[in-house]
Amino acid sequence: MRVQPSLISVFVAGAAVALALAGWNGGLAVPTSPLMLAQRGPNSVPVDVELVIAVDVSNSMDPEEQALQREGYIAGITSREFISAVREGIIGKVAVTYFEWAGLYDQKIILPWRVIDGPASAEAVANEIARAPWT
């Protein structure tokens, strides 16, 4: 089931990418040069932004809130505004990873690093997040 993207999820995803693409680093760990890579090996892929989505799934949230939260990120990643912000980057690519956590010793990587460079890769990322089992 897909929900319509909430204004907040679209705004947060779009704003994070837009600020990072603009090179603003007022306290955020964002690259200021398109040549900066977190990984410098031969298989490195240059991207405009490396986006970490860390999601609270602790007992303070009920299952409905957790599902709504996950759907919000899926909607944000596949939104027209997010894809437009990605394409407007110097490189036109964003690396994203998504993990859920419930405490110091309870974290699960749902989506290892993936590159989003357009609607097809954004949909593939969204599908991978959506298919992940609940912990």
Image: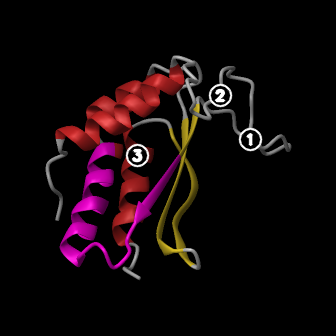
Q: Magenta span covers which residues?
A: 52-76
Q: Which label belongs to residue 31? A: 2
Q: Residue at x 48, y 70 (%)?
A: 101
Q: Amino acid at mark 2?
A: Pro
Q: Is residue 73 left or right of residue 37?
A: left
Q: Which label belongs to residue 56? A: none
Q: Tell me if mark 3 has few (under 14), some (14-19) or many (20+) residues whose alpha carbon lies within 10 angstroms of its own.
A: many
Can you tell which quarter of the image residue 119 is in?
top left
Could you tell which of marks 2 and 1 lies nearer the N-terminus?
2
Q: Is residue 56 left or right of residue 34?
A: left
Q: Is residue 14 above or below residue 64?
A: above
> Is residue 69 part of the magenta span, yes or no?
yes
Q: Residue at x 47, y 24 (%)?
A: 19
Q: Residue at x 45, y 19 (%)?
A: 88
Q: How many marks?
A: 3
* Foreground pick, 50 / 104: 104
Helix, strand or loop at label 1? It is: loop
Q: Amino acid at mark 1?
A: Ala
Q: Tell me if mark 2 has few (under 14), some (14-19) or many (20+) residues whose alpha carbon lies within 10 angstroms of its own.
A: many
Helix, strand or loop at label 3? It is: helix
Cα separation, mark 2 vs mark 1, equals 9 Å
Q: Amino acid at mark 3?
A: Ala
Cα separation, mark 1 vs mark 3, equals 21 Å
Residue at numbered disc 1: 38
Q: Tell me if mark 1 has few (under 14), some (14-19) or many (20+) residues whose alpha carbon lies within 10 angstroms of its own.
A: few
Residue at numbered disc 3: 122
> Is residue 25 part of the magenta span, yes or no?
no
